[in-house]
Image: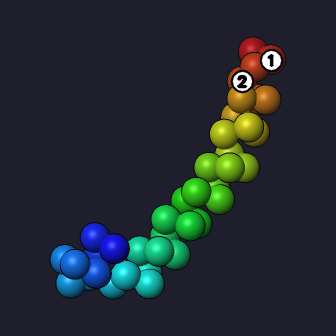
Amino acid sequence: MLARQMGGDAPLMAAVVAFTTLGALFTMPLMLFLFGFL
């Protein structure tokens, strides 16, 4: 929504936010699992 108001590429920003959220969903538990045994 902010990207649209600022004249940016709203669909691209929506995709970036969705991708980073999904990436964090998988990355954070993996890192906790790996570094939990150090």
Label 2 CA crowd tier, 10 Å (few <14, some 14–19, many 20+)? few
Cα distance in 3D space between marks 2 and 1:
5 Å
Residue designated by label 1? 37
Q: Are marks 2 and 1 in contact (CB under 8 Å)?
A: yes
Residue type of the residue flagged with mark 2: Phe
User: Viewed as shown, does residue 25 lie left or right of 3?
Assistant: right
Residue at (55%, 59%) from the top-left corner?
20
- Residue 5: x and y, percent? 22, 78
Give the residue drawn at x 37%, y 81%.
10
Q: Residue 3 lies in what quarter of the image?
A: bottom left
Q: Does dot 2 land on a helix, a strand or a loop?
A: helix
Front one among 26 and 2: 2
Q: Secondary structure at mark 1?
A: loop
The percent coordinates of residue 16 (x first, y second) are 49, 70
**Label annotation for residue 23:** none
Q: Residue furthest top?
A: 38
Residue 12 image position (x, y, % from top left): 43, 81
Residue 35's disc number? 2
